Amino acid sequence: MYALGTHLLIELKNCNPEILKDLESVKNILVDAAKKANATIISVNFHEFNPFGISGVVVIAESHLTIHTWPEYGFAAVDVFTCGETIKPEIAAQYIIEAFECKVPSIVEMKRGIISHRNEKLPHKVCHEELQVVY
């Protein structure tokens, strides 16, 4: 079964809270994860909450990486959603787990965009002339 994308839902429990509450560290970890996965970074946006907690997104040409941290619980929720053949979401996930010094990681993988009723590979991008809606 082929899909347009892979979505990794990553639960990070028992992480280093000092890393989870540091805006620059969190931002750099997600940006570095995108680079290590061979993604094309489009934009980066992070917000630090008071008294603590960070939410952020790294928009990539192949989709996105997002994070929400709860340093007071040593927890972060991360999404790595990718499309295409060249990007390696599992490399991004492993780097993120290690960088946050996570002791109890959990990853759920979902295939997104399973739209073909035939068992054939779906193109990631098509030309306008080739565009056809498939139901």
Image (cartoon, rainbow, N blue to C red):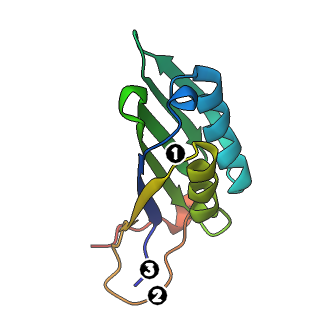
Q: Are marks 1 and 2 in contact (CB under 8 Å)?
A: no
Q: For mark 1, what is the residue? A: 64
Horizontal arrangement in the rendering, residue 16 relative to residue 13 (left or right)? right
SS state under label 1: strand
**Image vertical order of residue 90 relative to residue 36, above or below:** below
Instruction: State whether residue 114 appears in this view.
Output: yes
Query: In the figure, 132 relative to 45: above or below?
Result: below
Tell me the distance, in whole angstroms, between the alpha carbons under discs 2 and 3.
Answer: 6 Å
Q: Nearer the viewer, residue 14 or 1?
A: 14
If the image is split into quadrants, where does the C terminus sit? bottom left
Q: Label 3: few (<14), some or many (≥20) within 10 Å?
A: some
Local crowd size for mark 2, using a 10 Å CA cut-off: few (<14), some (14–19), many (≥20):
few
The mark lying in front, picked from 2 and 3, is 3
Which one is in front in this view, the residue at disc 1 or the one at disc 2?
1
Image coordinates of residue 35 in percent, x first then y, are 72, 48
Q: Is residue 123 left or right of residue 114?
A: right
Q: Which residue is mark 2?
A: 120
Amino acid at pointer 3: Tyr
User: What is the distance, in whole Å, between disc 1 and disc 3 at their CAs?
Assistant: 20 Å
Q: Position of residue 68 (x, y in %)?
A: 41, 33
Marks 2 & 3, CB-CB < 8 Å contact: yes
Residue 85, x across and y down, in percent: 63, 70
Write the residue at 49% across / 41% down. Answer: 15
Q: Residue placed at 42% from the left, 22% from the top?
A: 53
> Which residue is under mark 3?
2
Q: Residue 105: name its quadrant.
A: bottom left
